[in-house]
Image: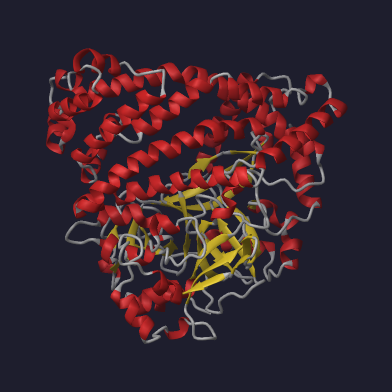
Amino acid sequence: MRKLLSLVVAVCITFSAMADEGMWLLPYIKKMNEKDMKAHGCKLKAEDIYSAEKSSLKDAIVIFGGGCTGEIVSPNGLLFTNHHCGYDAIQKLSSVEHDYLKDGFWAMNNSEELPAEGLSVKFVRQIFDVTADILGNIPSTASQDEFEASVNANKKALIAEFGAKYPGMEIVIPSFFGDNQYFAFVYEVYTDIRLVGTPPSSIGKFGGDTDNWMWPRHTGDFSVFRVYAGKDNRPAEYSEENVPYKAEKWLEISLDGVEEGDFGMIMGFPGSTERYKTSYEIDYMLEVDNPQRIYIRGERQQIWRKFMDADQAIRIKYDSKYAQSANYWKNSIGMSRGIEKLNVRDKKVQQEAAFQAWAEKNTLPEERFIEALSIIERSQTMSRKENAAMQYVAEAFMQSVEIIQLMLLVEPENVESFYKNYDVNVDRAVAKRMLQIYRENNEMLPSIYEKIDAEFGGNSDAYVDWLYDNTMFGTYEGCIKVLSSDDNSLLMNDPAYELSNSILELYRILFPPMIDSMTLFAEGHRLYIKGLMMMQPDKAWASDANFTIRLTYGNVLPYSPADGIVYNYYTTLDGVMAKEDPSNPVEFTVPERLKELYRTKDYGRYADKSGELRVGFLVNCDITGGNSGSPVMNAKGQLIGLAFDGNWEAMSGDVAFEPELQRTIAVDIRYVLFVIEKYGNAKWLIDELTIK
C-alpha cells in the first residue's frame, strides 16, 4: 500500500494534466497542475489557490447545505450560491402570504435577513494525506472483510486523534481511488445561516424542467445568504446576539466578463462520479437502474404536478421536492442517452481487454489483478434481482410515500417540519400509484400485499383509501396524539405503522445479499483501479468525485452538439425575452420589472462593451452534482460566474468525460449583480462587495 501511495505522488509530480478533464485534489496542484494552468492563462501561483500555511482562495469556498457549494464574497460573511441550492430553505421560509419562491425576497439591512433553520455552511480548515496511517498496517494478503475492518478501526482512531487536536471541528476521512488513498478533512461548521436575497423563480428557475441540463440557457440561478457567528467569530446556534461572520478570505468580483478562450477555473465540492465504472456496471445501469428510476419518478412527478398546478399552497409545499426529484430523473434520462450515443460501453470494453492482457502478462496470480474484472462481474450478477427490488423499495415507497417516511423519522422535532410540507391527499394519490407499479414490476412483494389480497380483493386503491381514512398520521395533531400517548397500541395498531413495517421487513430480506455483492465489488474495484495506475504509470489519474473540495480548470469555449450546429459560448437578456411563453407560465414567465429594465436598457455598469446584458456562459471545466453554486473564477482568481449545470449532450460525463462536448453552464456574475441592484433594489449588498 505504501508503494501505491508513492506511485500516486510520483504520477502527480511528473505529469502535466489536461486542462479540461479532472477534478484535482488541492494538495497536489502545485506539483501536478501549476505549470499547465499557467500555460492555459492562469496568473496565480498554486499557493494563492491552496496553501496549508496561509490564507488562500480555498478559504472562501464552502459546503452549502447538504449537497452544494457556496462562496464567501464579502468580509461580512455574505455568500453566493445557486437559486436551486437555496431552494429548499427559501421554500421553508415561504407561505401563501409571503411566497418568496414566486415573488423573490430582498433584505434591505441586516435586521431583515431571515434565519434559515436547519441550514449549515462548512469551511475546510485543514487537509491531510493520511494514507499511510490508514493502510500502513494492513497486509497485502488481507481479505476484503479484514481490509475493511482494519480501515474502519484506523479511521476511528485517527478521527479521535484529530478531534482532540481540533476541538469543535468535524473530521471526515473519505477514500480516494477505490480505497487506495485517504485524506482527512477538518471542517468548521456554522449553523446560523440567513437568507439575504433571492430572485423570483421566474428568474432563478427560468426555463424550469424544459431547460434543465440544456444550452442555450437563460437562468439567473443564484441566491444570497449570510453566515452568522458568535461574538468570538466561532460557530454558534442561532441567536439575535450573533453577528455576521468576519471572513479571513473572500472572493473579489470582476466586471470584465469573459471572451472565447479565456482561462476559467472552478473550485467546489463535486458529489459523485464513476469514471472507473466497468462495462458490467454500465449494463446494469442501462438495463435496470436508470429505467426504473426514470419510470418511478416520472409517475410520481405527474401526480405531484397535477396537484401543484391546482393549488398554490400545495405548490409551495411540493416545489422543492419536485425540483429535487425531477433533476436526477432528467439526469438519468440524459445519462442513458449519452452513454449509448457516445459508445461509452464499447470504450470500457476495450480498456478492460487491455487491462486483462496487461495483468496476465505482467502480474503474479497472488497479486490478484488477473481476477479483478471477474470479481466485479460476479458482484453485478450475484444479487441483481435483490438490487432491482431494493431500488423499487427505496424509490416507490421510502422516497415516494411520505407517510412511510414519517414512520422512519428518528428525531421527534422533525415531525413539525414534515407536516409543514405535507398534504395527505397528495400522498394518498401517490401511494395508490406506487403500490400499483411495484406489484406490476416485482416478484418479491412486501407482506402488505397479502393483506390487500385477503381483505381488499387485491384492490390496492381500496386499501390505500382505508389506510388514509383510518391512520392517525394523516394530520399533525393525530401524530402528536400518538407520540405523546402512554398507550403504545395507538402506534402499533395504526395502519401506517403496519405498512411501514411491511416495507422494512422486505428491506431486511433484501439487504444481506446486497451487502455481499457490495463487499465483492469493493474488492474488485480496489484491485482494478490500483492495477490501472500500475499499468499506466505516466498517466495523470484523477480520483472520482466524493464531495470533497476539488479544482478544475479550462477555457471559455463554444461547442458543436451535432453536424451543422455550433452553440455560442454566451447568452443574453435578449434570449430571456424571446423565450417568454404565456402558454407555459410555470417555466417561461418574464417578470414585468425585468421587461421594463430590458426596454429601457437600464443595465448600469453590468452590460458588455456592445451594450448587451449577458446571462450565461460556457467553460470546459469538469464538474458534477455538488458543484452547483461553485465559483467560476478568472485567471486572477476573481469571481466571474456561478456554475449551475452541465450540458445535455455530455450527460455521460460522470462515467466518461467527453472533452469535445462537455461544458459547464454558468450564470454571468454581471447578471447576478444586475438583478440584485436593478431588479431587487438592494444596492447596499453591491456596496459590500469587492468589485474590480
Q: Residue furthest front?
A: 564
Q: Is residue 224 visible?
A: no
Q: Residue furthest right?
A: 361
Question: Which corner quadrant of the image does residue 443 belong to?
Answer: top left
Q: Nearer the viewer, residue 375 or 546?
A: 375
Q: Is residue 27 left or right of residue 243?
A: right
Q: Quadrant of residue 128?
A: top right
Across and down, in percent, residue 533 comes to 76, 39
Where is residue 208 shown, x and y percent of the image? 39, 58
Q: Position of residue 539 (x, y in %)?
A: 78, 47
Residue at the spot x=25%, y=41% of the render?
418
Q: Please name whichever residue, 134 or 31, is drawn nearer the observer in this view of the structure.
A: 31
Residue 353 seen in render: yes
Horizontal relation, residue 54 to residue 676: left or right? right
How has the structure been colored for display? secondary structure
* Residue 221, image x, y percentages: 42, 63
**Occupied quadrant, residue 400:** top left
Compared to 639, does 8 lie above or below?
above
Q: Is residue 318 above or below residue 299?
A: below
- Residue at 40% in and 59% down: 233
Q: Give whichever of 412, 443 is nearer the camera.
A: 443
